[in-house]
Amino acid sequence: LGDTSLTRPAACVYRTVQSRQQLVRLTGSNLAYASSIAVSAADGCIFVAEMAANRILRYVPRSEGHFYGSVFAQLSGTMGPSSVAVHPTTRDVYIAMQEDDKVASEGVVRVMDSTGQEKGYIALDAGAGVTGIAIDPAGATLYAVVQGSEGGKSKLCSVALA
């Protein structure tokens, strides 16, 4: 945080083009703190968490290596999404919501289906600052890194997924 902001969005995401051995922009250079990227193994969609704008962007692969981008989810109520992960089989999108422990006592991971419809959330009682998430390759467990309160040590939490 601090390099980009809502008033000075300057982040971007790059991708490689293997056939041409090139590095090209996936996004424009106007993201307000791009905090995480996830790729869906099922369909190749790329999800970008943009923390300061409190939203998730989705880039859908098209022909010839092009991508179509749009706002997948406009979120509210927290500092913003700190991390994003895609379930390997259901294609559900898991979104870690960053919050300060002064205003919340538990962390939240929101769950949306592949069309952007909210399915629910997972509460983590280890603290409010969820800084990273991942799903194991089998899709059975969600792992979350939760920042300790008042700058304390981070904790690794795991949650079984149904």
Image (cartoon, rainbow, N blue to C red):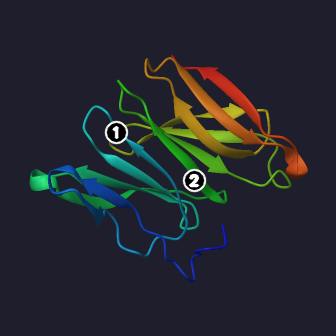
The secondary element bearing badge 1 is classed as loop
- Residue 80 place in picture, x, y as percent: 61, 58
- Residue drawn 57% across the image and 61% down it: 51
**Nearest the eye: 130 or 153:** 153
Dot 1: within a 10 Å radius of its alpha carbon, few (fewer than 14), some, or many (20 or more) residues? some
Residue in front for this viewpoint, 122 or 12 = 12
Residue 114: which numbered mark, if any?
A: 1
Q: Position of residue 122 (x, y in %)?
A: 62, 32
Q: Residue furthest front?
A: 21
Q: Quadrant of residue 8?
A: bottom right
Look at 51% across and 77% down and name the residue there: 9
Residue 29: x percent and y percent? 40, 75
Which numbered tag is attached to residue 64?
none
Q: Earlier in the sequence, mark 2 or mark 1?
A: 2
Asked whether the beta carbons under mark 2 and mark 1 sit within 8 Å of each other, the answer is no
Above or below — where is 94 with respect to 137?
A: below
Closest to the camera, between mark 2 and mark 1, is 2
Disc 2 on helix, strand or loop?
A: strand
- Amino acid type at circle 2 is Pro
Q: What residue is at 34 percent from the left and 39 percent from the top? A: 114
Please tell me in which quadrant of the rendered image residue 13 appears.
bottom left
93 or 1, which is in the foreground? Answer: 1
* Above or below, comparing residue 81 to residue 145 in the picture: below
Rendered view: 158 above or below 61: above
* Side of 130 where 47 appears, left or right: left
Q: Position of residue 158 (x, y in %)?
A: 66, 24
- Three-letter amino acid code of the residue under disc 1: Ser
Measure the C-alpha gap from mark 2 to mark 1. 17 Å
Q: How many marks?
A: 2
- Residue 147 lies left or right of residue 119; in this view the side is right
Q: Which residue is mark 2?
A: 81
Number of residues whose C-alpha sits closer than 10 Å to that of mark 2, classed few (under 14), some (14–19) or many (20 or more): many
